[in-house]
């Protein structure tokens, strides 16, 4: 006990205690539910067996049955389209805004702060707002498209199978663009201005400076943003619940919403856990990309 108290006084034991407390909290609140979910994906779980740990072990049957269902591959394709479209839209618009505010004109900081409103708003609130914007009868988006001559008749974004998934993608791009903009702005501010001055003296135009200086110097930031974007996009549930509910006929359904439907609407908790495990694999890949992208910052 004396050595324990002395280690607490010299600081080493206190540091270990803080790390142990945080690690224990993560294991209790995240690790155990994760392991429980993985175990449940190998069991037959319904409403009658949910309250007990003694459930029939079915091996890989949940996985085999899941990929044998006809709706599985369309939903996986929807998820791929949703992830790629959301990440691409958020990144491109966010990068454009970051470059725009990088000029640092009067009032740029105030205007940039307004863009954070979308990021701090709850997903269900964002979904309610975009429900009005995407309304087929009186939506603002249809009004703008009609007035500009891009469409002749209203598009029913939420109920048309050809547009329902893209309606959620548009809302998610709006939701995550400001996050991309802030992180990219931080990355741009870390590039030394001397590099641009030297390149300009050498005769490099704006595009050449962007291609040879900005993008290479932003490589780690871009990798981290894409990895975080993948994680956040795969976690996006609120917008689907608020805008399309995965319909019509699974046209806008994705894995994260499907896992909830299987568990809490169809009460097939084993299948819902199986879908979650498949998603965990992709999230782990994104997490590894993120750690690899930010490794040099930890070392520095």
Image: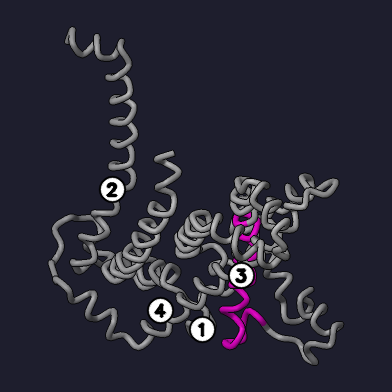
Q: Are marks 1 and 4 in contact (CB under 8 Å)?
A: no
Tag 3 residue: 89
Tag 1 residue: 251
Residue depicted at 24% across the width and 10% down the height: 5
Task: Give the percent coordinates (x, y) of residue 83.
Answer: 49, 71
Is 102 positioned to the left or the right of 83 in the image? right
Q: Residue furthest front?
A: 202
Give the Cα separation between the discs numbered 1 and 4.
Answer: 11 Å
Indicate which label's residue lies in the foreground, 1 or 4.
4
**Disc marking residue 31:** 2
Tag 4 residue: 76
Task: Give the percent coordinates (x, y) of residue 275.
Answer: 33, 70
Judged from the image, the secondary structure of the residue bearing numbered disc 4 is helix
Task: Please say if 284 is above or below 130.
Answer: above
**Residue 21 magenta-drawn?**
no
Residue depicted at 39% across the width and 51% down the height: 291
Judged from the image, the secondary structure of the residue bearing numbered disc 2 is helix
Task: Give the percent coordinates (x, y) of residue 274.
Answer: 28, 69
């Amino acid at each position: 006990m004396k050595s324990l108290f002395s280690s607490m006084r010299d600081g080493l034991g206190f540091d270990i205690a803080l790390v142990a407390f945080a690690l224990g909290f993560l294991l209790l609140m995240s690790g155990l539910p994760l392991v429980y979910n993985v175990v449940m994906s190998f069991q037959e779980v319904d409403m009658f067996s949910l309250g007990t740990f003694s459930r029939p072990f079915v091996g890989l049957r949940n996985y085999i049955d899941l990929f044998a269902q006809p709706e599985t591959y369309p939903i996986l394709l929807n998820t791929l389209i949703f992830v790629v479209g959301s990440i691409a839209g958020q990144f491109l618009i966010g990068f454009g805004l970051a470059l725009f505010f990088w000029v640092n004109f009067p009032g740029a900081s105030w205007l940039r702060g307004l863009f954070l409103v979308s990021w701090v708003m709850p997903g269900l609130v964002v979904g309610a707002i975009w429900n009005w914007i995407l309304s087929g009868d009186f939506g603002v988006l249809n009004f703008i498209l009609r007035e500009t001559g891009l469409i002749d008749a209203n598009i029913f974004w939420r109920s048309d199978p050809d547009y329902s998934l893209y309606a959620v993608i548009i809302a998610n791009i709006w939701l995550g663009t400001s996050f991309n903009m802030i992180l990219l702005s931080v990355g741009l501010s870390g590039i030394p201005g001397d590099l641009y001055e030297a390149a300009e003296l050498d005769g490099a135009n704006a595009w050449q400076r962007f291609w040879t200086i900005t993008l290479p110097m932003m490589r780690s930031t871009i990798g981290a943003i894409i990895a975080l974007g993948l994680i956040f996009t795969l976690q996006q549930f609120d917008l689907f619940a608020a805008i399309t509910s995965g319909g019509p006929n699974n046209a806008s359904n994705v894995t994260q919403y499907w896992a909830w439907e299987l568990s809490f609407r169809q009460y097939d908790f084993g299948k819902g856990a199986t879908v979650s495990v498949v998603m965990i694999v992709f999230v782990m890949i994104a997490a590894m990309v993120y750690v690899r992208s930010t490794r040099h910052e930890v070392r520095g």
